[in-house]
Amino acid sequence: MNEAWSLTRQLHREHLNTLSVLNDLEMRVINNAPKPIDVSDRNDRFRLEDFIRMIDDDLFRHYRFEEEIVFPRLAEVGLSPITDMLSMEHETIRGLADGLRSAAIVALESGFTSASWSEFRDGVMDLVHSVNFHIQKEEMGVIRQLDMVLGAGVDRELGVLYAAFV
Ligand SMILES: [Fe+2]
Ligand SMILES: [Fe+2]
């Protein structure tokens, strides 16, 4: 089997990417809190752009696929208590991420004010907390079982479907 097509692997890879992008942003927020992200600085600008890309691909798109395709299959084998809880967490995270995504877009255009920076920082910390908790739960409760529950053939089939999912 070509493992690159495995759905489990793709979801896991995106979890790691989410953690890495958020960790970088969190470090920037913690280590240099008084100084807003400077959109004329190449690294800071990249950080915001990467953050927006991560929200679109590794949160919004990823969550939609989990809810539409993955969770119903897990619910069929009796895991709906877990998938219901994970779907509720998606809602909370989507709400947080949506506000931060808009703030990041505005900042890329016109920079942060001290008020918008302070709000953005608080939002990032809330998002980091919720996402870390969610990924931890999903890795333990879903990813570890997923290819076993689905079977290697279906894991690959869904992986191919996910690679083309927009
Ligand atoms: Fe996930
Ligand atoms: Fe999820």
Image (cartoon, helix red, strand yellow):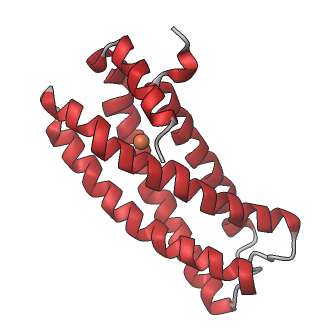
User: Where residue 3 sits: x, y (%)?
Assistant: 54, 16
Asked whether residue 105 is in view, the answer is: yes
Residue at image location 57% in from the left, 39% down from the top: 16
Asked whether residue 111 is in view, the answer is: no
User: Where residue 137 sits: x, y (%)?
Assistant: 35, 40
* Residue 23 sits above or below residue 160 on the image: below
Q: Residue furthest right?
A: 41
User: Where residue 139 sits: x, y (%)?
Assistant: 41, 34
- Left or right of 84, for residue 69: right
Residue at image location 70% in from the left, 63% down from the top: 49
- In this rendering, the count of numbered labels is 0
Residue at image location 57% in from the left, 21% down from the top: 4
User: Where residue 141 sits: x, y (%)?
Assistant: 31, 32
* Residue 33 sits above or below residue 159 on the image: below
Q: 57 or 134, which lies in front?
A: 57
Q: Residue furthest top?
A: 1
Ligand 1, image quadrant it occupies: top left
* Residue 152 sits above or below residue 4 on the image: above
Q: 110 or 65, which lies in front?
A: 65
Residue at image location 55% in from the left, 77% down from the top: 102
The quarter of the picture where residue 119 lies is bottom right
The quarter of the picture where residue 42 lies is bottom right
- Left or right of 119, for residue 72: left
The quarter of the picture where residue 41 lies is bottom right
